[in-house]
Image (cartoon, coloured by chain):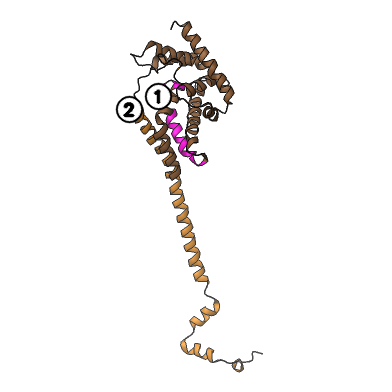
Chain colours: A orange, B brown
Amino acid sequence: MKEFDPVVSDLPYKESPDYVDRLVARCKAEALKQVEPASRVVRPWIYCLAGVAAAAAIALGVFFSIHRTSPMDKFLASLSDEEAAMIVDWTIDDIPELY
Amino acid sequence: MSVRASDILQQATDRFGQRLYWHIRRLVVSHDDAEDALQETFIKIFTKASSFKGDDDKLEAWCYKIATNEALQLLRRRTHLFQSLDTLSGELADLVVTESAPDADRSAVLFQQAVMQLGTQQRIAFNLRYYDELSYGQIAAITGKSENALRANYHYAVEKIKAYLKENAI
């Protein structure tokens, strides 16, 4: 496109192509550095949330594992082996009348 | 870090880095401002990479569009509220002298001052066509103007520059 007036249309600035190449590389590095902190701030929050979620899951697991034991299981666990054997041997006729 | 964003930024810097710098420099004149705007351009290219849907050919116009916007945004900070960017012409023409190399050819300085007399739209159209040698189609994609309007912009820009140079004895 330069046929208009090439004699006077060169830029009067002093920056050489090598200098601009280095400048471009520096600007790119700076740009990446500026974009990076955002992800650095976000990432710890993600780790924090993941940690809280994991802790909550563990707490719930423990809670349910404790409360999963039914009253019957508790009762059976409290019996001696002999008593448990007696219960197993019970038949419908063995149940005493309560009234 | 997104691989696509990194890839697009890499392409932009490798293929158009120099040209984007000079495009911005021709608009803002100051080297320091050009450096700031170039950095902002790279940040935008990286952060907006996911919104770039075009193919390889469109990447150039997309990068130029971002660079143009960043340069104009920087110039806008120098103006008062509701003041047109065109009012910066005189200030930018003076800045050309300050920013020129000590041994710069006087005619080259005068030519840039002549370019600074153009309105912002004309200047963008002139620079992209004359220096960057982009097609009117590409310039239309960058500026959002019609190709015919850009042809007219370029034509009037050349006439104004010639008149300025004649007036200033070159």
Query: Which residue is the extreme one toward the front?
Result: A3
Kindly identify which residue carries mark 2.
Answer: A18
Query: Residue extending furthest right?
Result: A99
Q: Amino acid at mark 1?
A: Asp
Q: Position of residue A82 (x, y in %)?
A: 47, 90
Q: Main secondary structure of the magenta part?
A: helix
Position of the C terminus of chain B, as image quadrant, is top left
Q: Tell me, for residue B32, which label it has, or none.
A: 1
Q: Is residue B33 magenta?
A: yes
Hey, what amino acid is under mark 2? Asp
Asked if the residue under mark 1 is in contact with the one under mark 2, i.e. CB atoms within 8 Å, the reply is no
Measure the alpha-carbon separation of dots 2 and 1: 17 Å
Q: Residue sitting at 42 percent across and 28 percent down?
A: B19
Give whichever of B111, B5 is nearer the camera.
Answer: B111
Q: Is residue A64 above or below residue A12?
A: below
Q: Residue furthest bottom?
A: A93
Q: Residue at x 56, y 22 (%)?
A: B150
The part of the chain drawn in magenta is: B26-50
Nearer to the camera, A35 or B3:
B3
In the picture, the disc for residue B84 is: none
